[in-house]
Amino acid sequence: MRKHFFSGIQPSGRLHIGNYLGAIKQWTGLQDQYEPVFGIVDYHAMTVRYDPGDMPGRVLDAAASYLAAGLDPERSILMVQSHVHEHVELAWILNCVTPMGRLSRIPTFKEKVRQNPDNINMGLFGYPVLMAADILLYKSEIVPVGEDQVPHLEFTREVARKFNSVFGETFPEPAEVLSRGAKVLGLDGVNKMSKSLDNCLYLDDSDEEIAKKISTAMTDPSRKRRNDPGNPDICNIFSYHEVFSTPDEIEHCANGCRTAEIGCLDCKRILIAHLQDLVSPIREKRVELLSRPDDLVDVLRVGGTRARSIARATMAEVRERTGVTLGRDSA
Ligand code: AQP
């Protein structure tokens, strides 16, 4: 039997190439070795202000992106987090073995507080605990994620260890699996590419939008004129080349930039072609999938049922260990 692991993306906006490289691309390669659970984590997306009327559309949109980018609902379990209540039940139990001081030191919390100063809520504070529950509910031994999630994985291991030491061996300590492109910077060249910062190349951008965004994106800030030699090491566009271009193209761009033989636009043209090749088929497939929303809902419903049966087994064990079984039905 294939082992499970859980990984997910928030339906907090359109998915972007950071989500693709940090998560979805790796996921597609793990579908034979494991029976993965890929969640659309809507409870996580509630930690910032949102319009409830938008949520169903965002979930559908994420499902279409998952499928269009190559996830196969036969080999994987595609589900919505809120369809499996055990996620929040386990999160509560894990809350009770989590020191508050440890949570307050997590860098992503500090970052979100900076971004949402007027809405610092308990959900935001406890976000890593819910994420630990997502992962541990399926007894994940690995979790493919982008670099920004490494502190959350470290925290998840600590929570698993704490639970095991208090209540007995129950959870494995999951390891993060990072890909090439585990940290994609946004088009601003400063922050990580992020839905909420809208500094993204989206998986549904048109060829024209891709060309426009890359043509106007920041490069090496010290290269002011075409004839100035540049430094690829501090150029955001070059960091994209390192992920998307061939070794020959990377060398051509690095040397051409350092010697000023090529200008930023020459370098960008090569990148634009690669990005258009990546995004076009995903965009077209998404349109086709979104024209059949009922089929997408069916995929999520079936995935929810499959995920629930794994989650129920784990929670039965967790309730046993924590002593909350008296008078309960087994489910
Ligand atoms: N820029 C990135 N580079 C590499 N990987 C990334 N991921 C996100 N951004 C990058 C990876 O995508 C997965 C899901 O992320 P998420 O949507 O659940 O949360 P996030 O990391 O907070 O993504 P965003 O776009 O920044 O969302 P908002 O703006 O709503 O907070 C994770 O595996 C993540 O590593």
Image (cartoon, grey):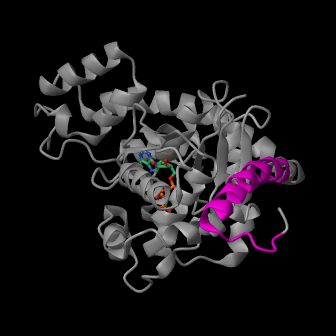
Q: Is residue 6 above or below residue 71?
A: below
Q: Is residue 277 above or below residue 40?
A: above
Query: What range is drawn magenta here?
Result: 300-328
User: Magenta segment, principal secondary structure?
Assistant: helix
Position of 50 with respect to 238 (left or right) is right
Please provide percent x and percent y for residue 163: 49, 59
Q: Is residue 8 visible?
A: yes
Instruction: Check the image and name the residue furthest to the top.
Output: 248
Which of these two is toward me, 294 or 84? 84
Please provide percent x and percent y for residue 208: 54, 42
Within the image, what quadrant is residue 4 found in? top right
Q: Is residue 317 above or below residue 273?
A: below
- Residue located at (39% from left, 23% from top): 245
Q: Is residue 186 visible?
A: no
Q: In the image, is residue 246 part of the stretch drawn in magenta?
A: no
- Residue located at (48% from left, 38% from top): 21
Please provide percent x and percent y for residue 215: 37, 42
Count of numbered tags: 0
Position of 258 with respect to 78 (left or right) is left
- Indicate the quadrant containing the C terminus: top left, top right, bottom left or bottom right: bottom right
Q: In the image, is residue 303 part of the stretch drawn in magenta?
A: yes
- Indicate the quadrant containing the N terminus: top left, top right, bottom left or bottom right: top right
Please provide percent x and percent y for residue 39: 65, 51
- Residue located at (80% from left, 42% from top): 288
Within the image, what quadrant is residue 181 found in? top left
Which of these two is toward me, 314 or 279? 314
